[in-house]
Amino acid sequence: MLRSGFGSIRRTFSPARSSCICHARLFTTRQVRPGWEAVIGIEVHAQIDSKTKLFSDTPTSFDEAVNTKVSLVDLAFPGVQPRLNSTCVEMAVKTALALNSNVQLRSSFDRKHYFYPDLPQGYQITQHREPIARGGHLTLTKLDGVVEPITVRLDQIQLEQDTGKSFHDMEPGVTLLDMNRAGTGLMEIVTQPDLRTANEAALLAKKLQAVLRCIGSSQANMSEGSMRCDVNVSVRRTGAPFGTRCEVKNLNSVRFLAMAIEAEIDRQIEVLENGGQIVPETRGFDVAARKTFKLRSKETAPDYRYMPEPDLPPLCLSQTYVDQLAATLPELPDQCRDRIMQQYDLNVDDANTLLNEPGSLVYFEELAKGRQVNIVRNWTLHELFGQLAGQDIPFEQNPVSVSQMGGLVDLVQDKKITGPTAKKVLRLMLESEHGVMPQVIVEQRGWARQGDAQALTELCQKLADAHKDKADAVRSGTLKFFPWFIGQAMRESKGRADPVELNKILCDLLGCKPEDVAALSKKKKKN
Ligand code: ADP
Ligand code: MG
């Protein structure tokens, strides 16, 4: 039965519950509560950023009409055979190298059997016995936001196929299937239980995202499903042996991951404090209720009947191949952060923003070429990012091109426009003037900085005459009205008046010392 492009089956279980957004708690130690410690490991599935699927030459689809990127191989028609995609292998090897993991010169594939409508073969091809890489680690430093530096060890990295996608809530009583994703290459990356708090787990997920994006092996976007995380959580009295763990599945943002871990820690501690026992389970997370809920018990976990994949020979790599890929690795996030903090005099938050927002570092570095770094920093990291955030636009959809933004920075740098004007121009480039150079916007609207001393003097004189009481007050030492005149003059000039020139003229006119005015504005900024 086909419905609007979907394959469909009868639904046997309930749809996911609705969501709301809340903030995660902040931790200052590795203990989650006095006397209690949590133990956390993460299993990540990252979709490999390759043009075609893992075992077929079907194009991968990240945003395509349903069931349009599917071949007979992906649908497991009788007689078809898998053929390994070399790009996926290359990406996995690069990922392993970037994560300090040992690439295995020989690995192999297995079939993992289970029956679900979005798995047409009736088994997933994975690397159960001999993964492509073993071991490895990621470190979290104070710059990443942890209290003490920690090393999170990795178990292994394995290549495997993705499934199709089931939609349970589009038509009542029916599950719809989109097979575009079926057969896409995944890297499963498993950490050892080295994490102790939700915050550490969230920072690790972010760090992993940064590494995968940096080497280009995955877009690692949790909300779009190109990075999916399951977390294993247990709690214990401080210093006691590891407790029984539960797995929380299907977390689709770093924030939800942190929230789910906190909720699960709270639940387990409560059970134990009330004299109960933790039963190994697979659980889901209800964002609205901020609670995890049971999906299934581990006792009823299926027997996957693993067997070697007979249609694929072992994957044998040469050391030369691995060495060649190692030589192509780009600068990794930690090195990059050190460099940009130094080169552009960035604080750690700004550096992390550039590392975490896909595309923003290249944008920033392009802009910084030959321009004053402090102006680029201010207008990109603070103003542009601020306006984008205000309009809920992710950086990836930033409509302002590097050349437009460069033009704007040049206008500010060359003192052709004032700060308030630059803000207006930026807003226009974001909202309506797509692709129009800022020079053109400024010219068309007559927004050039007004530095003509005579015109500004006339303007100030007019203001001083019209508001004689305030002008006299300033003249007799009540400096607090000085900024009021600056504000008025700015308003009258529609933000175009040169603030330095204006300051000078008003000081002369109202008989105050520039250093007193400067001291006043410094004091104001401090407050
Ligand atoms: P499974 O076969 O259930 O997937 P794995 O051995 O692959 O089990 O481990 C899954 C995850 O569970 C790993 O990330 C590991 O770090 C984590 N883990 C193992 N023991 C514990 C524990 N006691 N508490 C929390 N997490 C754990
Ligand atoms: Mg596992």
Image (cartoon, rainbow, N blue to C red):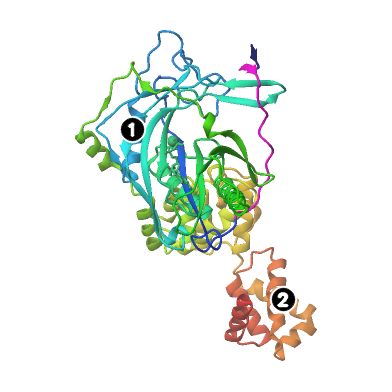
Task: Give the labeled residue for mark 2.
Answer: 484
Label 1's element?
loop
Q: Is residue 5 visible?
A: no
Q: Residues within 10 Å of mark 1 (few under 14, many from 20)?
A: many
472 sits left or right of 509 in the view = right
Residues drawn in magenta = 5-24
Say which amino acid is labelled 2.
Trp
Question: Under 8 Å from ligand 2: the CB of mark 1?
Answer: no
* Residue at 60%, 60% in the rendered image: 448
Say which amino acid is labelled 1.
Pro
The residue lying furthest to the top in this view is 79
Q: Nearer the viewer, mark 2 or mark 1?
A: 1
* Residue at 68%, 68% in the rendered image: 490
390 sits left or right of 325 in the view = right
Task: Give the labeled residue for mark 1.
Answer: 131
Q: Quadrant of the C terminus?
A: bottom right
At which x and y percent is residue 414?
A: 50, 63
* Residue at 41%, 44% in the rendered image: 191
Classify 18 as above or below 482.
above
Q: Quadrant of the N terminus?
A: top right
At which x and y percent is residue 31?
A: 51, 60
Specify the label residue 456 is tagged with. none
* Residue at 43%, 46% in the rendered image: 208
351 vs 226, nearest the viewer: 226
Classify 285 as above or below 6.
below
